Amino acid sequence: MGVYLVFTPVIPKISYQLKDTPSAAAASTQTSVNSIVIASAKTDAPILEGSSIAVIDNGGVWRRPNSSNDPAKSNMVIVGHNFTYKNPTPPFYALDRVNVGERIVLNWDNTQHTYKIVSKNIVSPTDTHIEDPTDKPRLTLYTCYPLYIANKRMVITAEMQQ
């Protein structure tokens, strides 16, 4: 048991280093599967629908049901794990590595949308204003922060590029 506890924090780091970075070609390929591609976070994940976050226990990210289901109209909120014991490097494991100005590609209903990251913040779990509807198309991503702890949230906000 002691060996397991010592090596558990190292496993995600090694797994992440071995993970492929999504290529520009992958990000530019339209797909019938709703998905998100963030090259700097090595994220290429399906966006799943469901009434609770439990839908992503075996992978993927989750579109919050109370957020926009049309990326061109309002705030689409996508949530993902940054660590699970089943998958040490889930889709948002390296969300903290993205920077303002970088690109996010969202494939939604056979249409590709490109977003530019405009902010990166740490908030408390009670700061639910990040999920509020907006007048302009917006993509909001969040995950627990810091790694292994769920007492804060890292929030990435991106605006749709025309």
Image: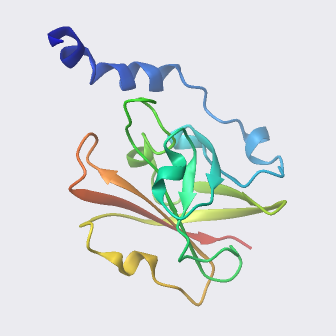
17 left or right of 19? left
Toward the left, the furthest residue is 2
Q: Residue at x 46, y 45 (%)?
A: 92
Picture quadrant where residue 13 is located: top left
On screen, residue 31 versus residue 12, left or right, reads right
Q: Does residue 7 appear left or right of residue 42 in this picture?
A: left
Task: Say left or right for 146 vs 112.
Answer: left
Residue 114's quadrant in the figure?
bottom right
| Residue at horizontal 45 percent and vertical 76 percent from the top | 131
Viewer-closest of 71 and 52:
52
Q: Quadrant of the N terminus?
A: top left
Residue 126, x across and y down, in percent: 26, 73
Q: How is the image coloured?
A: rainbow
Write the residue at 52% across / 47% down: 56
**In this view, 49 is above or below 145:** below
The extreme top residue here reads 3
**Residue 162: quarter of image:** bottom right
**Residue 3: horizontal and vertical position, in percent?**
20, 9
Residue 4 percent coordinates (x, y): 24, 14
Looking at the image, which residue is at 63% across and 79% down? 137
Residue 10 at x, y percent in the picture? 30, 20
